[in-house]
Amino acid sequence: MDTKQDYTGVVGFLLLGLAAIVMVFHKQFTLHQLILPESLLTFNVIFLSIFIEAIPFVLIGVLIAGIIQVFVTEAHLKRFIPQHPFLAVISSCFIGALFPACECGIVPIVRRLIAKGVPLYAGVGFLLTGPLINPIVLFSTYVAFGGSLPMAFLRMSLGLVIAIIVAGLIASVFRRNQLKRTREDVTRGETAGSKPPLGERFNAMFRHSIDEFFDMGKFLMIGALLAAFVQTYVSTSSLLGLSEGIVTSTLIMMGLAYLLSLCSEADAFIAASFHHVFPQTSLLGFLIYGPMLDLKNTIMMLAVFKFRFVLVLMVMITGTVAGVLLLMHPWID
């Protein structure tokens, strides 16, 4: 087990080191003597932009995960998470809205919470609302749409309703822990009984955060590479040409949100650029679906949760987002 963990850490370190080298020397790749294809240079720029944009939020996420690991006990969590499943779903969705994390930064936080004893369905509530309706995202939406309070409100309220529905469905389908690693593996090294000195606990917090960063960082890199490949080599104009009718246009915008894998703090500015092309319902599909589910956070969830759970969760999110938006369409546009 130790050998496997050491191997994983080395691989993650090498991948992140390679990314750092590319970030430092990427301008040299434009030298004429290298004669690199323009598409490859575009791929490089898009990959770096996605990776650099996501890294700060992943760092915030792993730091919070380290704090949860060392300073938060099951007794603390029980005070905030009600025992009744419905109340647990509601409270987790509202508490998740206070976490300033993007869709990739929230994954290590949720893994740590579930490993600490938070029910799976409550963890899903955190997972879906944290990147979607936190204050930073709502403010960026307000600004991107020219000071439109209705758009920011619709994103927040419909996103909250959808998160509650999905978390409730998870509560009815999955009764057991769906983490790939056992709870004991994730919380290994936690001190039981009397608390160690504060300095030792801070040291342990940073160690856990570093381990979490290398564990999640390599999957973020894989997701960013795939998202950059899609943005470089898949023509979005051909997809947009298929958007006839509210159902198709909403599904197209949801698909674009998944493939582009934009950070939830910035995606509203991209959605606003389609304001004169798509109805408001379709734009909300882009704004709500992307923070809940995209290419890079799918890769990260597959690293944390069992495959069947991730697949079911993806189907639930997709169906619920599309269903709620199409049902509400007459009152939105």
Image: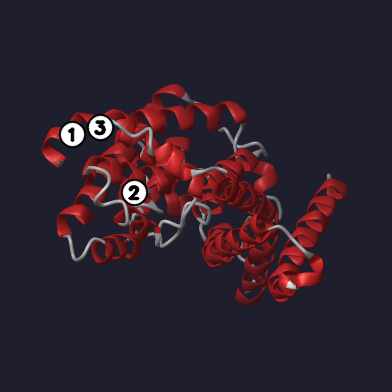
Above or below 213: residue 163: above
* Picture quadrant where residue 212 is located: bottom right
**Going by the picture, which residue comes out furthest to the left?**
331
Tell me what residue is drawn at x 84 percent, y 46 percent. 4
Q: Horizontally, is 254 left or right of 24 in the view? A: left
Q: Residue 287 carries which label?
A: 2
Nearer-the-camera pick, 7 or 40: 40
Q: Quadrant of the N terminus?
A: top right
Between the C-alphas of marks 3 and 1, the distance is: 12 Å
Task: Name the amino acid, label 2.
Answer: Leu
Element carrying mark 3: helix
Element carrying mark 1: helix
Q: Name the residue under label 1.
A: 328
Q: Mark 3 points at which residue?
A: 246
Q: Do the residues labelled 2 and 3 touch (CB within 8 Å)?
A: no
* Dot placed on the residue nearer the N-terminal end, 2 or 1: 2
Tell me what residue is drawn at x 13 percent, y 33 percent. 330
* Dot placed on the residue nearer the N-terminal end, 3 or 1: 3
Task: Name the amino acid, label 3.
Answer: Ile
* Dot placed on the residue nearer the N-terminal end, 2 or 3: 3
Nearer-the-camera pick, 7 or 76: 7
Disc 3: CA contacts within 10 A as few (<14), some (14-19) or many (>=20): some
Disc 1: CA contacts within 10 A as few (<14), some (14-19) or many (>=20): few
**Going by the picture, which residue comes out furthest to the right?**
3
Task: Name the amino acid, label 1.
Answer: Met
